[in-house]
């Protein structure tokens, strides 16, 4: 077959993105804008522009702006909690696993820079409290993992048996927001940088009396 007789191929239209792909792109755009511009910079106009959609097309995928925020929280949760659960079950003592679990939370900030702003933004726009409820649920999930490891450490004699495990749990939990708060206001700061030293200070205070 010569070039003259070869059939002419018809131009094909660029396929539309599937709904699930578009939704993922919208969530990714929100997280990017949240990190780059802060909460005030995240509008449906900016999200649609980042993804390359009209506002009308955007609302076909998410009926409200609050729905996008809730989807973003779910996306972060689906990445964070499996990582924390895996770290808590790795081989090692209870304190070693606790340290890895808390560090894993901070390391995820490097992968999801918007996580800091997302965690400090309690309400979410027009969410009628649903965003705050989701945030509280995520917090209690992490707290439950940390509490179980603190109890295990006390039972194993790694920390003093007379320690109030609820207070100790909150001390360990307090490491995360403190470091993330600095990261939020100092973008070049890496939260993991001082984590181990701070963790060791707490352990020193909880060590069994000799």
Image (cartoon, rainbow, N blue to C red):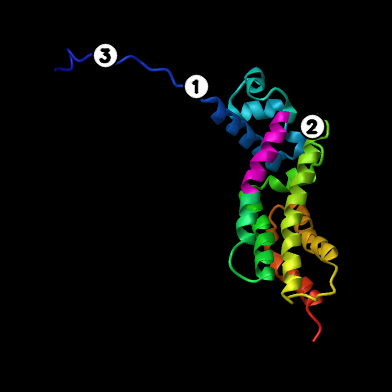
The residue drawn where x is 63% and y is 24% is 61
State the residue at coordinates (78%, 54%): 181
Q: Earlier in the sequence, mark 2 or mark 3?
A: 3
Residue at the spot x=65%, y=66% of the render? Answer: 97
Q: How far apart in space, not on screen, are marks 1 and 3 (Cα)? A: 24 Å
Distance Cα–Cα, label 2 vs label 3: 53 Å
Secondary structure type for disc 1: loop
Residue lying farthest to the bottom in this orientation:
210
The answer to whether the residues at label 2 and label 1 have Cβ atoms under 8 Å apart is no
The answer to whether 97 appears left or right of 202 in the picture is left
Q: Secondary structure at mark 3?
A: loop
* Residue 192, x across and y down, in percent: 67, 62
Q: Within 10 angstroms of label 1, few (less than 14), some, or many (20 or more) residues?
A: few
Q: Which mark is residue 16?
A: 1
Mark in the foreground, 2 or 3? 2
Q: Quadrant of residue 151?
A: bottom right
State which region is magenta. Answer: 67-80
| Residue 130 x, y percent position in the rendering | 79, 35
Where 129 falls versus 111 (above or below)?
above
x%, y% of residue 125? 79, 32
Would you name the residue on which mark 3 appears?
8
Marked residue nearer the N-terminal end (1 or 3): 3
State whether residue 59 is above or below residue 127: above
């Amino acid at each position: 077959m010569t070039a003259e007789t070869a059939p002419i191929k018809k131009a094909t239209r660029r396929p539309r993105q599937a709904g699930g792909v578009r939704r993922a792109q919208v969530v990714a755009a929100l997280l990017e804008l949240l990190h780059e511009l802060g909460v005030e910079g995240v509008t449906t106009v900016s999200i649609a522009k980042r993804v390359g959609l009209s506002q009308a097309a955007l609302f076909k995928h998410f009926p409200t702006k609050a729905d996008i925020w809730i989807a973003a929280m779910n996306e972060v949760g689906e990445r964070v909690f499996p990582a924390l659960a895996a770290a808590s079950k790795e081989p090692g003592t209870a304190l070693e696993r606790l340290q890895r679990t808390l560090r894993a939370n901070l390391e995820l900030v490097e992968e999801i820079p918007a996580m800091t702003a997302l965690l400090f933004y309690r309400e979410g726009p027009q969410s009628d409290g649903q965003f705050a409820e989701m945030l509280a649920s995520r917090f209690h999930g992490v707290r439950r993992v940390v509490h179980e490891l603190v109890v295990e450490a006390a039972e194993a004699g790694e920390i003093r048996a007379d320690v109030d495990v609820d207070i100790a749990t909150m001390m360990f939990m307090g490491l995360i927001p403190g470091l993330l708060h600095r990261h939020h206001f100092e973008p070049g700061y890496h939260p993991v940088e001082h984590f181990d030293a701070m963790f060791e200070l707490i352990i020193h205070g909880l060590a069994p009396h000799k």
